[in-house]
Amino acid sequence: MEEKIINVIFFGAPGAGKGTQAKKLSNKLTLPHIDTGNLIRKAISNGTELGQKAKQFVESGKLVPDDLIIDLIKERLNTLLESKLNGFILDGFPRTVPQADALHRMLGDLALKLTAVLNITAPKSLLIERLSSRRLCSNKNCGAIYNLISHKPKVENKCDICNTELYQRKDDSEEATKERLLEYQNKTAPLEKYYRDLNLICDIDGTKNENEVYNEIEQVLRILNAIAPIQK
């Protein structure tokens, strides 16, 4: 049977759970999870040509330009294509309509098509509550994420996996969270119409627990015939 190719974007406001779900889908289906933040850090660490260009912006506190991010994604996808790409998961990109246009052109150049844009939705009050309760493992090699409401660590302020101390990101305070959501509404939310017009948006109820949300994602992908149906 021909192996299915799954190319998806996880979309949603900060706190909706897209990063968590992207990792779950990546692990379950053995799909490469392309997080642009990690992609930039890895390119800088490896000292690649694109990494050196990105480093100049990062060290000066500037945003890495869209065209450079697209080049980094294209470089990563080319590597995956050489190793018989079975799909990819994009998380954290695109964030603006111009970025989406650039991504669309790049995928066309590589003869790749998006399967779906998984739009994880949740009300603003829940997003604020989740973000201000989020804690992260300070061990960069672990990076586990916890939530003091829905996913508490077994030992207070300690990572269950590596026993390293947890911390709260500065932009996860309640005031900073409100600012992040406002910025999302102004800059990123218009992407929903962009992808809905392309008939790629699949809405996912992000108010449920992690496993229920993941099950809904798998169900959507089965409906799209992107993954095999459950064997009875």
Image: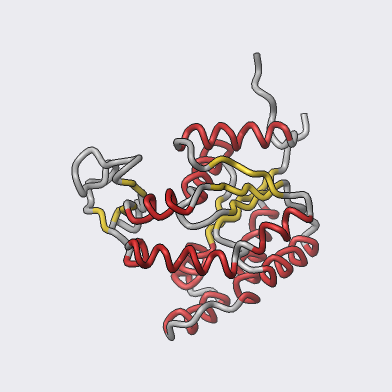
Q: Does residue 137 sit above or below 218 in this rendering?
A: below
Residue drawn 34% across the image and 56% down it: 132
How far across and how far down the image is residue 208, in percent?
A: 48, 36
Residue drawn 79% across the image and 54% down it: 198
Scheme of colours in the image: secondary structure
Residue reaching furthest to the top:
232
Q: Is residue 127 left or right of residue 86?
A: left
Residue drawn 73% across the image and 51% down it: 114
- Please name whichever residue, 59 or 168, is drawn nearer the observer in this view of the structure: 168
- Residue 84 visible (yes or no): no
Q: How many labels sit on residues?
A: 0
Residue reaching furthest to the left:
156
Q: Is residue 141 left or right of residue 187?
A: left
How far across and how far down the image is residue 225, in percent?
A: 75, 34
Q: Does residue 121 sit above or below 182 in this rendering?
A: above
- Residue 40 visible (yes or no): yes
> Which quarter shows the N terminus?
top right
> Which quarter shows the C terminus?
top right
Q: Quadrant of residue 91?
A: bottom right
How far across and how far down the image is residue 229, in percent?
A: 69, 25
Residue drawn 67% across the image and 44% down it: 202
How far across and how far down the image is residue 28, in percent?
A: 54, 36
Q: Quadrant of residue 194?
A: bottom right
- Please name whichever residue, 1 or 139, is drawn nearer the observer in this view of the structure: 139
